[in-house]
């Protein structure tokens, strides 16, 4: 019996325990991104999951969101807008603060993006 696409993709994702700090299980997507057919299938699957929503742009939060977001935007024929940590974007920005279990942080987006 042939492996499902989900099984194939899961086999490519590498688990890295205690990265970037103890107690975190990091899911490394690099092996999936290295495989052009697998990455294309991931992007097509994400596009299908958004069917009917008609987004105008794809927004991605650094850093993994830049990789996934730009690939998805290209697949869908849309533009991409980055959301970044404070002080990384030029020009007027809009910011939002958010709470973490150990403190707070902020994300910024360029106005008009």
Image (spheres, helix red, strand yellow):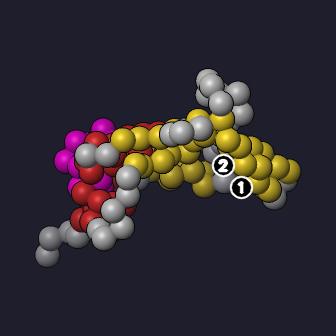
For the N terminus, the quadrant is bottom left
In this rendered view, identify the residue nearer to me: 70 or 36: 70
* Residue 57 visible somewhere in the drawing: yes
Give SS at disc 2: loop
Residue with the most extreme right position:
103
Magenta highlight on residue 109: no
Q: Position of residue 113 (x, y in %)?
A: 51, 40
Q: Position of residue 108 (x, y in %)?
A: 66, 40
Magenta highlight on residue 37: yes
Magenta region, main secondary structure: helix
Q: Position of residue 98 (x, y in %)?
A: 76, 54
Q: As displayed, is residue 63 above or below residue 89?
A: below
Give SS at disc 1: loop
- Among the two numbered marks 1 and 2 on one chain, the one whose residue lies closer to the N terminus: 2
Q: Distance between the Cα atoms at labels 1 and 2? A: 5 Å
Q: Residues within 10 Å of mark 1 (few under 14, many from 20)?
A: few
* Count of numbered circles in the view: 2
In this rendered view, identify the residue nearer to me: 39 or 98: 98
Q: Residue 95 occupies which quadrant of the picture?
A: top right
**Which residue was labeled with disc 2?**
18
**Residue under the point 24% across and 57% down:** 44
* Residue 32 visible somewhere in the drawing: no
- Residue 23's disc number: 1
Q: Are marks 1 and 2 in contact (CB under 8 Å)?
A: yes
Judge from the rendering whether residue 88 lies leftward or rightward of residue 97; answer left or right.
left
Q: Residue 80 occupies which quadrant of the picture?
A: top left
Q: Position of residue 97 (x, y in %)?
A: 77, 49
Judge from the rendering whether residue 72 lies leftward or rightward of residue 4; answer left or right.
right
Find the magenta span and give its range. 31-43
**Residue under the point 54% across and 39% down:** 112
């Amino acid at each position: 019996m042939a492996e499902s696409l989900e099984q194939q993709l899961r086999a490519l994702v590498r688990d890295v325990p205690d990265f970037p700090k103890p107690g975190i299980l990091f899911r490394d997507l690099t092996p999936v991104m290295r495989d052009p057919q697998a990455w294309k299938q991931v992007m097509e699957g994400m596009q299908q999951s958004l069917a009917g929503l008609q987004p105008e742009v794809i927004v991605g939060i650094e850093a993994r969101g830049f990789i996934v977001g730009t690939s998805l935007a290209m697949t869908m024929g849309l533009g991409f807008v980055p959301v970044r940590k404070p002080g990384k974007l030029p020009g007027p920005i809009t910011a939002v603060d958010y709470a973490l279990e150990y403190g707070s942080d902020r994300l910024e987006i360029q106005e008009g993006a």
